[in-house]
């Protein structure tokens, strides 16, 4: 499948980069603010844990799962998510739980990993260089899906960025992040 062959390397790299950042978080950083206004660092990691659990379930055509409390196990959950999506059948058809094409869900996961990785890096003052190919794919996807994302509460109001801004800054702006955010 073209989607799986194209997407899995991007998803794996974005997931590992985000997992590296999660592993770097110190206990005293859990209360720091993030560019994702609804979350502090601990809340963002809890959200990432839920994203991993949700997309693992969806990758097996399972139900939508609810977010649980902070567990501190994002890297392990993310490995299970990637394993679920590494099966060709995970990319076929429509999700019974979400009513969206599985390829759309794969893109949603990629956007979450790329953007929330940046959120976390900014919050804990770490360098963050997302994979340019992942950014390109995520930007193309969000340009098409931004309005639906806003309607479903996944994206905030767009933040204006110059037309000639780097692709990652444009991605952040499309989904409602200010690329110049600092704590």
Image: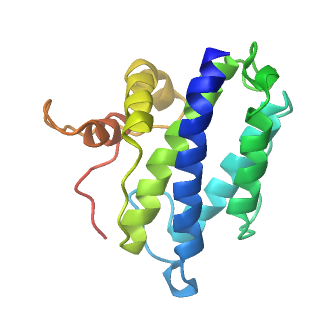
Residue 18 against residue 137 in the figure, above or below: below
Residue 64 visible in this rendered orientation of the protein: no
Q: Residue furthest bottom?
A: 28
> How far across and down, in percent of the image, does residue 1 sit?
68, 15
On screen, residue 86 versus residue 30, left or right, reads right
Q: Residue at image x 46%, y 31%?
A: 150
Which quarter of the figure has residue 43?
A: bottom right
- Given residues 163 and 84, the one toward you in this image is 84
Q: Residue at image x 50%, y 68%?
A: 40
Q: In this figure, which colouring scheme has been used for the structure? A: rainbow
Is the C terminus in the top left, top right, bottom left or bottom right quadrant?
bottom left
> How far across and down, in percent of the image, does residue 162 sit?
13, 35
Which quarter of the figure has residue 2?
A: top right
> How far across and down, in percent of the image, does residue 26 sit?
54, 83
Residue 79 against residue 175 in the figure, above or below: below
On screen, residue 49 versus residue 13, left or right, reads right
Residue 99 against residue 77 in the figure, above or below: above
- Tally the marks: 0
Q: Residue furthest top?
A: 93
Q: Residue at image x 62%, y 25%?
A: 5
> How far across and down, in percent of the image, does residue 108 sit?
57, 33
On screen, residue 118 versus residue 170, left or right, reads right
Residue 99 visible in this rendered orientation of the protein: yes
């Amino acid at each position: 499948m073209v989607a799986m062959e194209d997407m899995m390397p991007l998803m794996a790299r974005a997931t590992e980069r985000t997992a590296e950042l999660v592993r770097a978080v110190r206990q005293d950083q859990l209360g720091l603010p993030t560019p994702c206004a609804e979350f502090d660092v601990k809340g963002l990691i809890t959200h990432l844990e839920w994203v991993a659990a949700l997309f693992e379930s969806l990758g097996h055509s399972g139900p939508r799962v609810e977010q649980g409390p902070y567990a501190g196990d994002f890297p392990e959950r993310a490995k299970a998510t990637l394993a679920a999506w590494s099966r060709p059948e995970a990319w076929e058809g429509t999700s019974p739980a979400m009513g969206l094409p599985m390829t759309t869900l794969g893109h949603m996961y990629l956007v979450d990993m790329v953007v929330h990785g940046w959120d976390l890096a900014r919050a804990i003052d770490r360098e963050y260089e997302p994979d340019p190919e992942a950014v390109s794919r995520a930007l193309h996807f969000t340009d098409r899906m931004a309005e639906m994302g806003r309607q479903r509460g996944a994206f905030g109001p767009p933040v204006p960025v110059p037309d000639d801004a780097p692709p990652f800054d444009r991605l952040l702006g499309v989904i409602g992040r200010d690329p110049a955010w600092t704590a």
